[in-house]
Amino acid sequence: MAMPVCPKCAQGKYLCPRCQREFDQGRISEYDVEAARAMHGIFGPEADFKKAVDTPSHVIIVVKADDVGTVIGKGGGNIKRLAEALEKPIKIVGDGSVKEMAEAFIAPAKVNGINEVLEPNGVKKTRVHIAKADRPLLRMDLEALRKLISAVSDEKVEVLLD
């Protein structure tokens, strides 16, 4: 089982000192903890996911690309149980590159290009370019997209209209 929290914390009400430290340092979020507990309740010790991100309309759970179908379940049964446990609609996303993540969240708009830039302070940033004509197709504003893609990919991301 690989989750943001340890198996003991996925089963219990409280975080162990190690997981609490990760939470306090911002490495895991409240939704990582809640999703871990919900996933453990449904899948038991085989529960596996990488990250949970809260958006205004959904909780996005990032799993291994090969596990998307299993997490959704036959007829969407598992995802319905997760939505009930987390009290919010769920979107399951397979992990991948920044480009794959961006394409998943920006669709039906198209990603024109992605490039990496090095800021003057030495920090690497990934720029995602979207055609201005596709703006009406976006389901959220650029800042929300930036935050979402950054949170899911664990990279610094900038979303631009070209």
Image: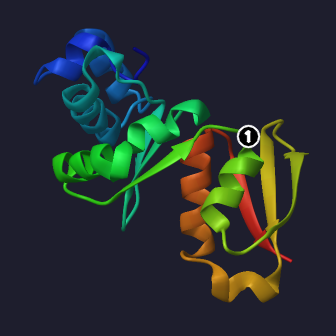
Identify which residue is drawn at 67% across, 74% down: 108
Identify which residue is drawn at 22% across, 46% down: 81
Q: Quadrant of the C terminus?
A: bottom right
Q: Is residue 69 left or right of residue 149?
A: left
Which scheme is used to colour this image of the protein? Answer: rainbow
Q: Is residue 116 left or right of residue 7?
A: right
Image coordinates of residue 92 in percent, x first then y, are 46, 48
Look at mark 1 in the image and give the residue it sits on.
Answer: 97
Q: Is residue 162 left or right of residue 6?
A: right
> Looking at this view, is 78 or 4 the one in front?
78
As drawn, which residue projects farthest toward the front? 74
At mark 1, the secondary structure is loop
Q: Amino acid at mark 1?
A: Ser
Image coordinates of residue 57 in percent, x first then y, are 36, 67
Q: Is residue 15 visible?
A: no
Determine crowd level at label 1: few under 14, some 14-19, many 20+ residues with C-alpha closer than 10 A.
few
Image coordinates of residue 129 in percent, x first then y, are 82, 66
Identify which residue is drawn at 40% across, 60% down: 55
Image coordinates of residue 34 in percent, x first then y, are 24, 37
